Image (cartoon, rainbow, N blue to C red):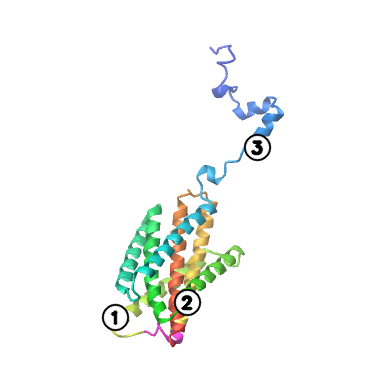
């Protein structure tokens, strides 16, 4: 038998059975001050709900690049111009950390920053060695990398580049062939042979292709960031985006160094 007491005949939070608390609220006479307070209340945006935002991606990527630049500067200052062994060890360590990050379900901020530091140390040592042969190549490579990044960002934001499944498949197939070609050339060089990829017109074409593939990887990174924000990914995904963007920029910078070295080979 139901109680006739109106207090016990109400549901949770004091609303009538079968009615939501919001229906009850609208049925009541709210004062002007209460209505104004409701309208002033902020909406639950991405920051409040823990979803990824573009600011998160920019901040994480900026930190990753800052660590890379600082490590590169440290290698430039501390190492001699021909420290190829140390540079090689840093590159191998960065490759191992990069593989670990690629297979982890969640990006680890510490690993991303470690990867950036190792890559920065490798790039600093390598750039110093090349700059000793071709003075000014460091500044040229940095400016070239920045120009490619700015151009790709502008083209993507303007809608000139559409990242589709077919676009990604073709680009990744070309990238796989490019990497295999470089590996074959490396093995051949160890036995005193050469495919001519490091000089002459063929070297220039391969260098331009390498820079173009780096730009392609950037477009995939931009699309991945946009998709992650659209589907409400957690804020931790900003570090995965930072890793991808850092990796693409390192690729472009290395290919830019190689291309400029080929173009200035007769200096």
Magenta span has 96?
Answer: no
Image disc number at residue 209: 2
At 65% from the left and 34% from the top, the residue drawn is 38
| Element at label 2 | helix
Q: In this rendering, is residue 3 above or below 119?
A: above
At 57% from the left and 17% from the top, the residue drawn is 9
Whole-percent x, y for residue 4 in the image: 58, 11
Q: Which residues are magenta?
A: 195-202
Q: Can residue 29 be seen in this snapshot?
A: yes
| Element at label 1 | helix
Image disc number at residue 82: none
| Element at label 3 | helix
Q: In this rendering, is residue 212 above or below 224?
A: below
Image disc number at residue 190: 1
Question: Label 1 to label 2, Cα distance in Å?
Answer: 23 Å
Whole-percent x, y for residue 91 in the image: 34, 68
Between 91 and 12, the residue placed more toward the observer is 91
Q: In this rendering, is residue 134 above or below 96?
A: below
Whole-percent x, y for residue 200 in the image: 44, 87
Q: Quadrant of residue 18?
A: top right
Whole-percent x, y for residue 187 in the image: 31, 78
Magenta span has 201?
Answer: yes
Tell me the quarter of the image containing the C terminus: bottom left
Q: Can residue 170 be seen in this snapshot?
A: no
Counting residues from the N terminus, which is met first, the one under dot 1 or under dot 2? 1
């Amino acid at each position: 038998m139901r109680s006739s007491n109106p207090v016990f005949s109400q549901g949770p939070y004091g609303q009538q059975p079968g009615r939501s608390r919001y229906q009850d609220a609208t049925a009541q006479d709210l004062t002007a001050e209460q209505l104004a307070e409701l309208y002033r209340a902020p909406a639950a945006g991405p920051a409040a709900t823990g979803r990824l935002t573009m600011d998160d991606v920019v901040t994480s990527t900026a930190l990753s690049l800052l660590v890379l630049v600082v490590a590169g500067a440290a290698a430039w200052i501390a190492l001699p111009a021909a420290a190829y062994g140390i540079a090689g060890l840093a590159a191998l360590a960065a490759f191992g950390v990069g593989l670990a990050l690629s297979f982890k379900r969640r990006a680890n901020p510490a690993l991303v920053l470690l990867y950036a530091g190792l890559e920065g140390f490798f790039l600093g040592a390598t750039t110093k060695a090349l700059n000793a042969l071709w003075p000014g190549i460091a500044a040229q490579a940095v400016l070239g990398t920045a120009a490619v990044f700015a151009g790709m960002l502008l083209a993507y934001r303007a809608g000139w580049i559409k990242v589709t499944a077919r676009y990604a498949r073709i680009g990744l197939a070309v990238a796989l062939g490019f990497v295999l070609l470089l590996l074959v050339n490396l093995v051949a060089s160890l036995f005193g042979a050469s495919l001519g990829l490091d000089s002459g017109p063929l070297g220039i074409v391969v260098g331009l292709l390498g820079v173009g593939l780096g730009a392609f990887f950037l477009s995939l990174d931009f699309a991945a960031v946009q998709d992650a924000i659209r589907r409400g990914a957690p804020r931790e995904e900003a570090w995965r985006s930072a890793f991808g963007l850092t990796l693409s920029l390192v690729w472009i910078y290395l290919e830019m160094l190689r291309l400029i070295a080929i173009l200035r080979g007769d200096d």
